[in-house]
Structures are given as structure tokens and as C-alpha cells.
Amino acid sequence: MIEHLPVLLVTVPIVAALLILLLGWHDSRFCYPLTLATILFQFAGGIALLIEVMREGTIHYYLGGWAPPLGIEFVIDTFNGYILPIVLLLALATAVYARRSVEKEIKPEKIVSFYVLFQLLVTGLVGMTITGDIFNLYVFLEISSIAAYTLIASSRKPRAYVAALNYLVLGSIAGGFVLLGIGNLYVATGTLNMADLARLLPASYGLATVHTAFLLLVIGFSIKVALFPLHLWLPDAYTEAPSAVTVLISTVMAKVSVYAMFRVIFSVFTTAYFVETVPVTELILFIAAVAIVAGAVLAIAQEDLKRMLAYSSVSQVGYIVFALGVANQIALEGGLLHILGHAVMKGCLFMVAGVIIYRLGTSSFSDLKGVAATMPVTCAAFALAGASMIGVPPTIGFASKYYLVLGALEAGHWVYAAVLLAGSLLAVGYIWRFIEVAYFSASSHHEGGDHHPAPGVREAPLSMLVPMVILSILCLVLGIFVDPLMKIVAPAVSLLLGGA
Amino acid sequence: MEAVLEAFLSHYNYGMAIILMMIGLYALIAKQNLVKKLIGLNIFQTAIFLFYISFADVEGGIAPIYLPEGMEAIYVNPLPHVLILTAIVVGVSVTAVGLSLIVRIYEEYGVIDEAGLLKMVKRR
């Protein structure tokens, strides 16, 4: 059983998705427990695989028993062994959170297909994480993308259709670039297996074909992770999607795209290629720095909580890509920590936004005055996760930014280290806006002499509150116990820097 | 100059794929009608498919089928064809989702061109 776990993580949910669809026709009450059970199974599997990898080393699973490079293989090493539980933890938290949120934000007849697509999205992302074959990566990328387009459009708001179409067009261009890049790699080497590619590519590092492949792949994944000038699909998609979907795509999908970018750049092309043969690190550093500042400034300018958090994602992705540009041990440790940290804290923040929409029906700042009085737990969770976003010690956000700054200083990038700190200061600006509105503005109902809160506005339902509070506490706990975490992150980074 | 022309003519299939790709991207960016944009996306994807198929070709090659004992033949590379089969399925699904989104947008806003849509979205 355990030796077939990698493939079960992908096949079981696909079968479950079909089952949800069939049983959902019969009775839609089956959907939710089935989804939750499948994701629980995946989460347990992800943890089991991480433990196995830490104990025994890299796991290779040959699909159908065909050995690579002919067959497709799933590879779980310390890097994706670390990413996989993050993906599934967030998927699990979102699944718990989604039930009440979906009842309110999605038309009843669409709930069955919502859970089917939810399942497919998570499966596509898990597949992207564990596959060792670059074309397989593309297929899973498209599975998750198509599921994401439709999930965004499942909202009741008509603007969601426009946001989804926008994302569909840009996402398909990104997919096309990735496909073209993979084609170029195949022309240069004649193989699609990542480990095999890393072995064969050095012989053709001088070829224009390989340079083209590198650029196409980097640009394709940059659109997917919404790196600053290519982020145009992100704000609308995050704002208009149903809350549960926003939580899932802002945390899990963004992180897996970043993972794919790291995997292709480090494990397929190796550090030697992109630091020496095609020196793009300076350019990546510059773009990441612009992303950090521009994302944060745009976030401050927003009038809507969800949209503000969306722009904050643009800024935070900059931090992770920054680690890629510095490309030394310490900075990459910071980058990988930030993948975990940002997933946890942004998940919590978007859950808060979703809860507020659930109770108030809006997330515009002007309607949120004094909301902390009626929803104290929600706002406390926001404050804690927000502190992590800013990088207040001892949260996880502090730990990751600390390593990033140390790494930048070690590489001698003084100016960029200052940009990282400036990004944190700007984060204070946008996180504080909500805190001020929620805690320090008099509620519009109080002004009229009426001291009763608006009818229906009370604390969120328990099933939404629990995952949100757990994630916000995780921000703190992970930050305090960062040392055991480094025992997983450090070997992952050594693996990346050492090539495949 | 002649060398450049020579290089282009000997690899004209790649040149064609790139030209087709640019036509697709142009339609995607410049066309106002959403359906035409999606057609542009299709042309862009088809160009990539053709790129794969053309580099798989071997001069004088035949389809990779099993030949009786004693017969010899040159096969074209079958792998890119298989890969593109997958990519075509992806392309079809993306087109289907895109078209259904456009239908919904038309039902909701009553417009199908980008400028009109932006106006309608801002007004609400």
C-alpha cells in the first residue's frame, strides 16, 4: 500500500470526483463528506510521504512499472515532500471552511459541480507537485488551471465571468509558452524526464534552442505566479471568485506555480546554467524588488479588503521570487519558508475577508467600520496573521524575511536588502488600514445613537472560524518552532542548489 | 543575406509556426470581439501543435507500425504526436470553457466586444 501511495494521491481523488458527480445527482448531501474524506486521505498521505522521504530519502514511483526515461515517474524528494503537506493542509482547511461559505455564495444547483471541480483542482496541484516528468507537469498544470477558471466563474457575481475569462486568456498563453518551452527542451535532448533532462542538458547549454526554452518556461510560469508586470489577471480573479475559491487559489495554486518554477529552474536547468551561462539573476532580483514595492503600494491604494489582499499577494510573490534571484543557501531557505508562511497567513487573511462577506455581504472598507466589536475572534485572527505578513517576531513571516535579508546581505545586495525591509514597512500600511477601520472607527450604527449592532452581524459560524483560527495560530507556532522546520527546509535547499 | 535566406528556407516549417503564433497573439491582443479573441487563442495553440508535429517528422519516414520480419523502414518520431494529442484535448477544454464564459457574459451584459464590456462593468 505504502509503495503505491504516490499514485493513489492522484488517482483516488479523480475517482472520488467522478463519484461526487454521480452521487451528487442522486443526493447533493453526499458531496461534502466525500470531498472532505478524500482530502483528509490526501493530507494523511502527504504527511506519510514526507516522513518516508525524511527517513529513507527520495522516493521514485514508476507509473505502470515503466522505468524512466520511457515511462512517467513520480519523484518525491525533500523539496516537494515539503511542499506537498503545505498544499494539502491548506486544501483541508479550505474544504472545512468552504461548506458554509459555498452555501451562501454559490447557487444551490451548482454546489455538486463546485465540489467536483474543487477536487480536480487539488488533484491537479498535487500531481504538479509530485511528478518527475516535465510534460506531465504541463498536463497537471492545465487540469488545475481549467478547474480554477470554472471555479472563479461559479460565483453569483456577474463580474466573476469577466475575471474568469481574463484569467483564462492569460493562463492559456502561459500554458502555451510552457508547452513551447517543453517542446524546445525535447528538441535539444530527446527526453522529457526531469532528472534525465538535467543530465543531458549541460552538453547543449550553448544552443539557442535551450535559451529559448528557458525564457519561455520562465515567462510562462511568471504569468502563472503573477510576478509583477504579468499579474494583471490576479486582482480581479481573487476579488470576484467565491471566498473559498480565493483562499484555495491564492494559497495553494500560487505556491504550486512557484514550486514548478523553482523545480524547472533548479532541477532541470541547474544553478550553473542560470547563474553562469545565462546570467539572469540580476534581472530577476530587479523584477522581484519592483514587484515587492509596487504590489504593496497598489495594495495600500485599494478601497476593498479582498482586492487589497490580492495586491498584497503580488507583493509577497516578489519575496519568494527574490530568493530565486539571490540563489544562495540562506536566501532560498527564506524563500521556501515564505512559501509555507505566506500560504498559511494569506489563507487566514482571505478566510477573514470571506467571513466578513458572509456576514456583511461586502468587503469594502467604508462598510467595515467597527466590525471588531461584533466579530472579535475574526478580527483577532486578522491581526495575528497580519502581524505575520508584516514580519513581526516571533511569527513565521518574521523568520522567512529574516533569512531572506540575511541571504541578500551575504550575497552583497545591500540595496535589495533595504527594499525587502521597505516592503515590510509598506505591509504595515495596508494591514493597518483594516485594523484601523475594524478597531478604531466608530460603527456607523453607533453614530446614530443606536448602540445595537446591525441585525445579523455576529461572529462567524464555527466551521468557518475553526480553520481560520488554526491558521492564524499556526503563523505564531511555526514562527516559534522554526528550528525543527529548518531540518526539512535546509536539505531541500541543498538538493536544489546541488542540482537534480 | 543568402545564408540567412538559406537558413530560413531549410527550416521554413519553424518559421511558419512562429508566424502563425504571432497571428494568433495579434488577434488575441488587438481584436475587440471576445469570440475573435478566443479564435486567436486557438490559432496560437494550433501553431504550437504544428511546431511539435513538424519537428517529429523524419524525411521519408512512415507511421511507426510493426512491420513483418525482414522489412525495414524509417519511422517518424511518434512521441510528439502523442503529446500533442493530450495538448489538443487541453485546447478543446479551454475553448469550451472560454466560449461558455462568453455566452454568460453576453447573457449578463448584452455585449460581446471588449470596449463595450468594460463600459458595462464600470457602470455597475
Image (cartoon, coloured by chain):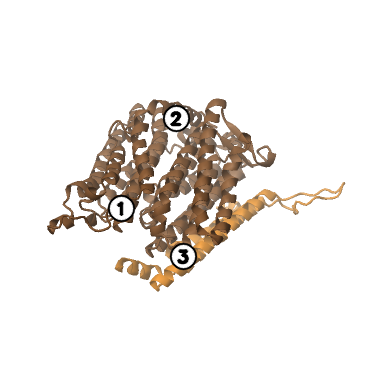
Disc 1 + disc 3, Cβ < 8 Å: no
Q: Farthest left residue?
A: A449
- The circle drawn on residue A171 is none
Labelled disc at residue B101: 3
Label 1 CA crowd tier, 10 Å (few <14, some 14–19, many 20+): many
Q: Name the chain letter of the residue that bears numbered label 2.
A: A
The residue tagged 2 is A489
Q: Which one is in front, A284 or A23? A: A23
Hue used for the chain lettered A = brown
Q: Which residue is mark 1?
A: A356
Q: Measured from the top left, where is residue A302 in percent x and y?
A: 27, 53
Identify the image quadrant of residue A473.
Answer: top left
Question: Sequence order check: which comes first, mark 1 or mark 2?
Answer: 1
Secondary structure of the residue carrying numbered label 3: helix
Chain letter for the part of the structure drawn in orange? B
Q: Nearer the viewer, mark 1 or mark 2?
A: 1
Q: Is residue A132 left or right of residue A437?
A: right
Could you say where residue A74 lies in the image, as x and y percent from the top left?
Answer: 59, 39
- The quadrant in which the C terminus of chain A is found is top right
Element carrying mark 2: helix
Amino acid residing under circle 3: Leu
Q: Amino acid at mark 2?
A: Val
| Camera-side residue of A210 and B9 | A210
Numbered disc 1: what chain? A
Residue A75 visible (yes or no):
yes
Q: Nearer the viewer, residue A55 or A290?
A: A55
Residue A33, how many percent across, how many down? 50, 50
- Check the residue under mark 3 and report the chain it is in: B
The Cα atoms of the two marked residues, 2 and 3, are separated by 41 Å
